[in-house]
Amino acid sequence: MRIAPEPTTPGILLVDKPQGITSHDVVARARRALGTRKVGHAGTLDPMATGLLILGAEWATRLLTFIVGLDKCYEATIRLGVTTDSDDADGAETHRVDAAALAAISDAQIVAGIAALTGEISQVPSTVSAIKVGGRRAYELARAGEAVELKSRAVTVSRFEVLAIRREPGTLDVDVIVDCSSGTYIRALARDLGADLGVGGHLTALRRTRIGPFLVGDAVPADLIGADALRDPALVAAQVLGRLDVSATQARELWDGKRIAGRGAEIAGEVMAAIDPEGRLVGVVERRGDDIKSRMNAPGPASETPSVAPAGAPGDTALQEEQA
């Protein structure tokens, strides 16, 4: 199928990914629907998972590097008593405890185990994660039967709460909600909870409901992706980074790569979104002493591409692999 000419309007897209397809499938749908190959994402979800994906189209993919590190919220179901080789329901079962062992686990023990995995913790990612080991994805090595050893990493789980504990003959499911830093693996939380309780565990359901200030309730279904769902890059950048209004003259100076004198003290945090009087995104600016300067410029009125791209920013490819 021939792709239509690229649209002139860039934007950010919130998509509610359904179960059973990959995040790259969603990117492919967006490319077809928007008529461009310049589509990237700010972190994927496994095929089993559902929920919020954030995509960027055209030069707005440059903003994804500022979105990818935002904190996230998930709703999940952990099945205790069964271990899989992927730490989720898509893997092969490797161990199962008997009904008596499950019955011996009290609700209070589950709550205490979850509390121990809350806060700043050290976590070893799942062996089927997308982390690169020697230039190859960990999941590629694991599926090839090669040994995979991943280093632990510091993550923050600011909320890990029980929503329900459901007991059926031979099963023990725990519904939870998790607020966490980027880079946290929910599958690893399920694995570690089961291990700490001595019965094993894995993830059977996962839904991402929030990325930073963006909610899945505001996302479009994957089959309704279209140009009308694209969000203005200026509004998105201001929502994520904070808004710094600049004059038309200052906007031109930033687009020309110049510094704006005397406004450095107005930068709250590391960077902010500079917005011109017409509501356009001029760029992402940072403090340089008493001045400000663009770290990344959006296209100016007579330009088609950003003059500066932040390190690690994507072109027409994905920005970060799955962190669930």
Image (cartoon, helix red, strand yellow):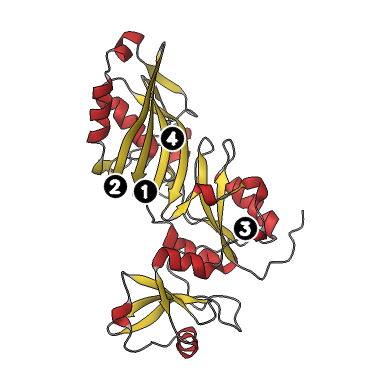
User: What is the crowding at mark 2: few (fewer than 14 residues within 10 Å), some, or many (at least 20)?
Assistant: some
Discs 2, 1 touching: Cβ within 8 Å: yes
How far apart in space, not on screen, are marks 3 and 4 (Cα)? 38 Å
Discs 1, 4 touching: Cβ within 8 Å: no
Q: Earlier in the sequence, mark 1 or mark 4?
A: 4
Discs 1, 3 touching: Cβ within 8 Å: no
x and y, in percent, of residue 225 in the image: 65, 52
Residue, disc 1: 183
Discs 3, 4 touching: Cβ within 8 Å: no
x and y, in percent, of residue 40 in the image: 55, 58
Residue 126 visible? The answer is no
Q: Amino acid at mark 2?
A: Val
Figure check: 103 above or below 188: above
How far apart in space, not on screen, are marks 3 and 2 (Cα)? 33 Å
Q: Earlier in the sequence, mark 3 or mark 2?
A: 2
Residue 321 visible? The answer is yes
x and y, in percent, of residue 217 in the image: 52, 47
Secondary structure category for the residue under label 1: loop
Q: Earlier in the sequence, mark 1 or mark 3?
A: 1
Figure check: 195 above or below 10: above
How far apart in space, not on screen, are marks 2 and 1 (Cα)? 7 Å
Which one is in front, 15 or 188?
A: 15
Residue 155 numbered mark, or none: 2
Q: Nearer the viewer, mark 1 or mark 4?
A: 1
